[in-house]
Image: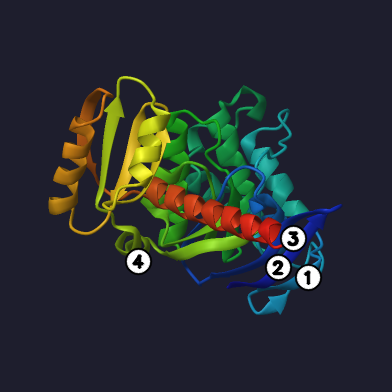
Amino acid sequence: MIEIQGLQKKYKNFAVLKGVDLFVGKGEVFGFIGKNGCGKSTTMNIITGLLAKDAGSVRVNGEEVTTAGRVKVGYLPESPALFEYMTCRQYLDYIAAACRYSGDFHRRTDEVIEIIGLRDSADRKIGGYSRGMKQRVGIGAAIYANYNIVILDEPTSALDPQGRAEVMQIIETLKQMEKTVLLSTHILTDVERVADRVGILNDGVIAESGTLPELYHKYAGDTVSFELSDFSQPLCEKLLQTDFVASFRSDQKTFYVQLKGDIAQSAPRLFRFLAEQPETVVRFESQTTSLEQIYMQVCYRAACQSALQSAAHQGGGF
């Protein structure tokens, strides 16, 4: 449904996309994740035809994307603009006219209102809606034309838990309707809840992709965490010198460590190692693999590779 090969985009002299390869299959929910400014929204704008690419190929439903208005996708931008003086029903009727909906738009408006869960509030002005309700109106506009592909850019951004749950329920409904959904969000637990496959955009390329079971299996870790009474840089350096630690990251005083080999053997070695250090350990436990851990590992690996390449390049210049 969405096929991207070698996609490149620069803003002045800064390369945002350096050769993105991405495939989103028919009827799947694809979680598109990456840090702020990595190019997710740029990629989505190119898919919809709102932004021109510099190089590469972008095909939607088998057709190359060239200009906006001819791409049959529904799109929710990160900050949708709504006419708040309208009611939800009036706004969706307006969307029907804007997208030149050819069917019974009264019936379609009622269908969309039901999908986004605003039947009891459909005749209230949007200006009086909560942030979550406004986001649902935006999703309603994105799905109104009933295209098979829906692109959602940060649909749960800044929503409270109830608002997030309501938006995720809509995505579940779209999944049941066999819509193809490209979902960008920083809330990785939401991706784990609905996504069939995931792509991690890092440094202008897709650094990792696959189904969630594939990624869990690939990165399944013999992972433990421990918390110190205070952060310790010397301990970081010592961990890197051990032969039973594959990698680790720290979040202030908490360390997340991926061990080498069998955790039944490596974990006791780590525990003994920590007991010999002057730092005080206040908590020690095993960890289950999550998408957040996978994401951090992928980005850490990419950063290490980039640092090594940079060092090699600088060394070669002398």
Nearer to us: label 4 or label 3: 3
3D distance between C-alphas at marks 2 and 3 = 30 Å
Residue that numbered label 4 is attached to: 214
The three-letter amino acid code for the residue at tag 3 is Gly
The structure residue drawn at horizontal position 22% and vertical position 28%, both measured from the top left corner, is: 283
Residue 172 x %, y %: 41, 52
Residue 84 visible (yes or no): yes
The three-letter amino acid code for the residue at tag 2 is Leu
What is the secondary structure assignment of the residue under circle 3?
loop
Nearer to us: label 1 or label 3: 3
The three-letter amino acid code for the residue at tag 1 is Ala
Residue that numbered label 2 is attached to: 7
Look at the image and tell me in which quarter the N terminus lies. Answer: bottom right
Mark 4 or 3 closer to N-term? 4
The structure residue drawn at horizontal position 56% and vertical position 43%, both measured from the top left corner, is: 155
Nearer to us: label 2 or label 3: 3
The structure residue drawn at horizontal position 58% and vertical position 37%, both measured from the top left corner, is: 135
Residue that numbered label 3 is attached to: 317
**277, 284: nearer the viewer:** 277
3D distance between C-alphas at marks 4 and 3 = 41 Å
Mark 1 or 3 closer to N-term? 1
Residue that numbered label 1 is attached to: 55
Residue 159 x %, y %: 51, 31
Residue 313 x %, y %: 68, 60
Reply above or below: 180 against 114.
Answer: below
- Left/right placement of residue 231 relative to residue 199 reads left
**68, 192: nearer the viewer:** 192
3D distance between C-alphas at marks 2 and 1 = 6 Å
Residue contact at pointers 2 and 1, CB within 8 angstroms: yes
